[in-house]
Image (spheres, helix red, strand yellow):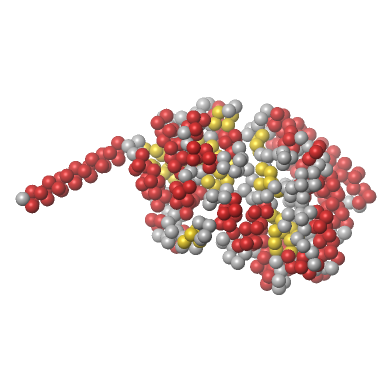
Amino acid sequence: MKKTLAIILALVLTLGLASSALADDSWPTLRVEVFDRDTPGLKVAEGWQAKYAQENFGDPNQINIEFVGYARWGGEEGLIAADLAAHIAPDICITYNNNKIVDQYIEFDGLWKLNDLLEGAPNLKAFLTEEGDDLLQVGQRDGVQWFLNARRISRANVGIFIREDWLKELGMEKPTNIEQLTAYLEAAQEKKLGGDNTVAFPFGIYESDPMFNVRRITDAFVDFAQVSEEDWYAYSKTPEMLPGAKEGFRWLNKLYNEGIISESFALQNNDAANDTAMVMGYNGFFTGQPDQPWRTDKNYEIELEKNVPGGHWISCSPFVNESLGKALRDIYTPAGLLIFVPKDSDEEHAKMAFKYLDWLATPENLFAMQNGTEGINYEKLNEDGIPVGVKAAADVPDENKIHAGDIAFISNGLYYGSAEKNAAALSLPFTGYEEDVKAAYLDSMTDTWTQIGWSVPIQAVTDYEGTVRGAEAKFIADVVSCDPAEFDTVYDAGIEDIKSAGATEIIDELRANFQAGNATGTFPGNK
C-alpha cells in the first residue's frame, strides 16, 4: 500500500511539474533589450536582475521575460538597426544614438504610437515627469509619442569653487554676488596668497567650445528684461550676443588687466600646467564639474592638502544675475537613452512592454534592480535609505552581479526619491568629503536652466559651427586681453566677425525652428 501511494504521489508530482512546464511554455515571451558591457561573471540574460524580473513581474503576470543583450561598446546602434531591419528586434528597444534610428522608423511608421500605452502606465509616467520637466515632449512629433527617454538623475553640470582657507585669511565670507567675488579675487592677488605664482582666477579657453567656460560668467550679466524666450533659443549657440553679455566680458577684461587672470590664459586648456597650479595652491577660484575638486583622476583637494596645510576647496554661488535675482547654472537635459517599441511586436506585446516598464518604475522594483541585495551587493542602508558599503562587481558572487544602468534603463543614474538624497548618494564615494560634495551638487542644481536641444537636425550648425567656434576663440582672446580703452571697439568688431563666420545663418535657423516647436530646454527668464 505504501509503495502504491508513493508511486501515485510521484506520478502526481511528475504530472504537476509537467503541467507547470507546459504552462510556462504557453506564456507569451516579452523580449527586452539590455546592454552588455562584457563584465566578467555577469550574464545579463540570466543574472540576478533577470531572475528578479521573472519572479516579481513575469510569474505573477504569466509572462516569460527574456533579456536580449547587445554589446554596449560594439556599435550597439548598428546591431539594433540590423535587427530592426531583419524584423527580429526585441519588443522593448533602447539606444543612446540620439534620434538617428527612431527618426527613420517614425518616417516609415515602423514604431508603436505610445500615447495610449503610456496612459496605462501611471508609475512610469509619474517617474518620467516627477521634477516638472517635460521629458515626454522630447519623444513627441506633432503630439504623437513615438519614443520615451530614460530619466537622467544626475543633471548637474556646473561647479564653482573657492578657497575657504584664503577666505579665512582675508577675513571674508563666502561671496554671494559678483561684487564680493571681485573684492576677494583682487585681495587674494594683491596679497599673493598662493605665493609668487599666484593666479587667483585660472581662466582659460576651451578650443572645442570657447563659450563653454565663459557663459556661466556672462549669463550673470544678461539683461533678461531685454531677452525674449525666442531670443534665448535663437542665440543658444552664440550667447555672447545676448543683451548684457558684453558687460560680462568687460568684467573679465578688468580682471585680466589687474593681473588676476594669467597673461597666457588663451593658451590654457586644462593642461598639466593648470593641474600643477591647482594642487600647488597657486589658484583661488575656478569652475568645473560639480565634483571636480574631489575626483579620483585629478583630486585637487587631497593633493592641495599635501602641499598647502589647511588648503580647502568649497562650493560657492557668486554669479547672481541681477535682473532675475538668481545664480544661474545650466544643467543637462533630463532626457537619457531612447526607449521605443517596434511595430514588429504585435499589440499584445506592446501592452506587455508598457506593463513591464510600469512595473520597473515602481520605487521598490527600481531600487532592487539598481542596487541588488543587502549584505551581498552592499553592506546596509543608511538613515536616508541609501546603500552604503557598495561592493565592487569583482567582490560579488557571479549569481548576484548586477548593472543598474544597462538593465534598469528607465533611469540613467541611481535614484533615491529626491534631489537631496540623490546628491547625498553621489557624495558617498568621496570619503571624508561627503558634505562638501553634497553641498556642491545641491548648489549646482539651484536656479538652473536646462541646456537647449533640437528635435530636428540644424543644417546651419552642421555647415558653420566649426568656423563660428574659431571666430569665438579669437574674439574671447582679444576682448579679454585688450586695453580697457579699446574694449568697446574690439568687442563690436569681434561680434561682427562671428556673424560673418556663419553665426547669422545659425541664429536665423534656430529662430525658425523655435517658432516651429522643435526646441527643447528651458528659458530662465520665466518667473
Which residue is depicted at the point 80% across and 38% down?
A: 225
Which residue is depicted at the point 50% across and 36% down?
A: 340
Residue 472 visible in rendering = no
Q: Nearer the viewer, residue 242 or 165?
A: 165
Q: Nearer the viewer, residue 103 or 389?
A: 389
What is the x, y in percent for residue 126?
Answer: 53, 40
Q: Is residue 183 left or right of residue 142?
A: right
Note whether 365 is above or below 306 in the view shown: above
Q: How many marks?
A: 0
Answer with the quarter of the image where residue 286 lies.
bottom right
What is the x, y in percent for residue 139?
Answer: 57, 34
Note whether 217 is above or below 355 in the view shown: below
Q: Is residue 230 left or right of residue 151?
A: right
Q: Is residue 289 left or right of residue 255?
A: left
Q: Nearer the viewer, residue 69 or 267?
A: 69
Which residue is depicted at the point 78% across and 34% down?
A: 504
Residue 416 visible in rendering = yes
Residue that sits furthest to the left in the current view: 1
Q: Quadrant of the C terminus?
A: top right
What is the x, y in percent for residue 441?
Answer: 64, 55
Which residue is depicted at the point 73% across and 31% down?
A: 511
Residue that sits furthest to the right in the current view: 485
